[in-house]
Amino acid sequence: MKPAILIHGPTASGKTALAIEVAKRLGGEVINADSMQVYRDLQVISARPTEEEMDGVQHHLFGHVDAAERYSTGEWLEEARATIRKMELSGKRAILVGGTGLYLLALTQGLSNIPPVPEDVRADVRMIAETEGAEGLRERLAPVDAETAERLGTGDRQRLARAYEVYLATGRPITDFQKDRQPPVLQDGEWIGFALTPPRAKLYQKIDRRFEGMLMQGAMEEARKLIERNLDPELPAMKAHGMPWLAAFARGEITAEFAAENAKRDTRRYAKRQFTWIGRQFPFWPRIPSPELEERMRVILALYREIDRPVEADYS
């Protein structure tokens, strides 16, 4: 198997262009590892690559899921597994790219076997999260899963809600399932990961400019079409960066300027969390701080050729 290349980094850090260039130079194909770019309804809002940007490179798992679905990490992992194996048989190199660190973590370290949570339990926990906030969730979780409650504190309402709904659905703390992981799709030696870490000030400026460009490219029209479908606002696609603010503007609740500024702010905050994720979850991945495409390619090609070099037999 030709070692796969994994490219991770904060939003707007140039992952798409880099992955396409790597695929062109190494005879590879690109597999999406971004939880929003899977949705066909979010072409502009998720910054999904266009046919022109793909430049003839084969892309997989982009825009193939309807916004009404709750696409899970487990579903992505199985589709990624099948795609990687097909590419292996055809002699293609897999280039996995995206900002969803959990996808890449599951790919290389395995996925916890957490049972599905019934929708009524999800709804109950959502109500608790809305009325009691992260602190309320933590207080409820602490007696039944002290380890997770202590680790998360009150800084991650989404994960607190996830841990609490798993307990309500199964009667067991989420840590029990996290300790029982499926074997990873990619074993050690079958992949190499790179983390893009451009200067934050410049990245935040790029995030602002990109959102303004999205508005010109039809982000508002995309948001309106989703609103017209009357989808559950708790669906992942409805929580895409900028989507809640665009929806509020479309409903006449806020001004366009207020929507844009808050969408930019939330995206910058998300990028900051992605930097933190890289530091905690991928501490040994080579960092590429340069924003320049050629410099990034130089680093990737040098390290990739090192691990892809055939091992010479020892006949002594």
Image (cartoon, helix red, strand yellow):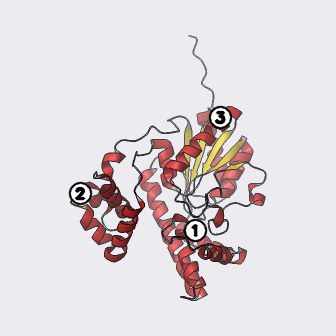
Q: Earlier in the sequence, mark 1 or mark 2?
A: 2
Q: CA distance from mark 3 to mark 1?
A: 35 Å
Q: Earlier in the sequence, mark 3 or mark 1?
A: 3
Q: Is residue 299 left or right of residue 171?
A: right
**CA separation in Å, label 1 and label 2:** 40 Å
The crowding category of the residue bearing disc 3, from other C-alpha atoms within 10 Å (few below 14, some 14 to 19, many at least 20), is: some
Q: Work out whether residue 131 or residue 310 is closer to the camera in this orientation and state it.
A: 131
What residue is disc 3 on? Answer: 88
At label 1, the amino acid type is: Leu
Q: Residue at x 37, y 75 (%)?
A: 130
Residue wearing tag 1: 203
Residue 47 visible to the viewer: no
Residue 268 placed where, x, y %? Answer: 52, 71
Residue at point 59%, 17% (across, down): 313
Image location (x, y in percent) of residue 269 = 48, 71
Considering only order in the chain, which callout, 2 or 3, is on the residue closer to the N terminus? 3
Which amino acid type is shown beneath numbered disc 2?
A: Val
